Amino acid sequence: MTRPNILILMVDQLNGTLFPDGPADWLHAPNLKRLAARSTRFANAYTASPLCAPGRASFMSGQLPSRTGVYDNAAEFRSDIPTYAHHLRRAGYYTCLSGKMHFVGPDQLHGFEERLTTDIYPADFGWTPDYRKPGERIDWWYHNMGSVTGAGVAEISNQMEYDDEVAYNATAKLYDLARGKDDRPWALTVSFTHPHDPYVARRKFWDLYEGCDHLLPEVPAMDYADHDAHSRRIFDANDWRSFDISQEDIRRSRRAYFANISYLDDKIGEILQVLEDTRQEAIVLFVSDHGDMLGERGLWFKMSFFEGSARVPLMIAAPDLPAGRIDEPVSTLDVTPTLGDLAGVPMEELAPWTDGESLVELAQGGARSSPVAMEYAAEASYAPLVSLRYGKWKYNRCALDPDQLFDLEADPQEQTNLAEVPEHAGTLQTLRAKSEARWDLAQFDADVRASQARRWVVYEALRQGGYYPWDYQPLQRASERYMRNHMDLNEVEERQRFPRGD
């Protein structure tokens, strides 16, 4: 069979409620809107875990954190866990990554044959939470509200420098692939760090949102005491008492966030234009690792099962998938089996290695009845949290907290917990039974604690004496680039031109 090329466009911390059916009308995102028009659009897609490293490991493997062991942003992603890059490479694909994937541990490839950039975050165990010390803040790496009070305009930042490099390397690789030196199908993953905070944007994109009607959240900030237990833990982890958040801080933060969606749209437009100019056809998948609360009910960033944090955009443009909106809840766990299905990898080869299911049948008019599962066991938690999205219902459970049950059709802002409402006792019992059948929370908690304790020992040991970090060093074969004396200049000029002409 002829296997299709695959382009995966991943962004970081993009709130899925802003993509109800592709980008919201008011967002300045022309390239993503054009992509949406030819895509199957999953309006209710969820992360497997609302934090970068665990969400990304689950996205790549199709396995929940309780299975991968990637519980937080400093947990090792083991080399023996198959990813979509392994599955596609095994099927004959050239696999390549430009950008962020937040791999922790000595394996910085996880099935990618080539990686074009280093990562933006560290690859070691230094960001390990510690359930033995509930409430402890580790100031040098925990989020705080400085991202909100410091929001505004800049022409360069750490994250802009990174994403500029990601886009440059991605377009250069697409040009190189067009030259036809490798006859294998390719799977290129391009993964940006925007619109992740800090909320800082370039002026040209900031100016697009002058007078925007969406600069304040729909649900205003609530008193600390009125929040659920986990939300209070998030506030404490974010050091909220040290900051005085004004309405202007909120407006500026949301404006910069929207501006950075437009910044990403610009980068993605460059990449898709190169694909078109070089006459390469490819399946295009667009997704985020998790969302951002953006000030709704006073919460920022992620770490929560609320919609702003847990829901993500997911769109797939493929010849065999009709363009249109799908409302059934789906998961980023479904990406790996879906890519395998679209690439012609036998599903029985993928099934043992994934908790997700292919979205191809659903996109083609089929049905889905299985619930969507989420887990969280990182900073701001003192014990694992789990969630099921089943039809219109979302059910959240933690050994430390009262159950939560939300009807997302009647209450999309999740303001009314129905877990204690008698008329919903049957629904609660059904979903609790499904949750208990899937998760042993006591064992989950023990596994997380054991992992954290091991990593604290190893990290402290490896920082003594000689230090040999795992951070990925991109390989540059300088003696094989451009023109060198072992090459024929005429051949180089001909080989590197596309199209080659007469």
Image (cartoon, grey):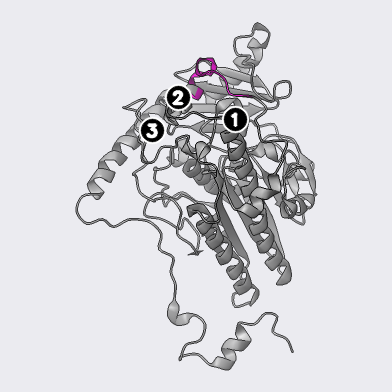
Residue designated by label 3: 448
Neighbourhood count class around disc 1 (C-alpha, 10 Å): few under 14, some 14–19, many 20 upward: few
Q: CA distance from mark 2 to mark 3?
A: 18 Å
Total marks drawn? 3
Residue marked by disc 2: 233
| Residue 440 visible from this viewpoint | no
Quadrant for the C terminus in the image? bottom right
Label 3: which secondary element? helix
Nearer the N terminus, badge 2 or badge 3? Answer: 2
Report the Cα–Cα distance between label 1 and label 2.
23 Å
List x then y, in percent, for residue 70. 44, 41
Q: Which mark is residue 172?
A: none
Say if mark 2 contacts mark 3, CB within 8 Å: no
**Whole-percent x, y for residue 369 in the image:** 69, 31
**Residue at left 66%, top 43%?**
313
Q: Nearer the viewer, residue 127 or 451?
A: 127
Q: Amino acid at mark 3?
A: Val
| Magenta segment | 220-231
Residue at 58% x, 23% y is: 221
Identity of the amino acid at label 1?
Answer: Gln
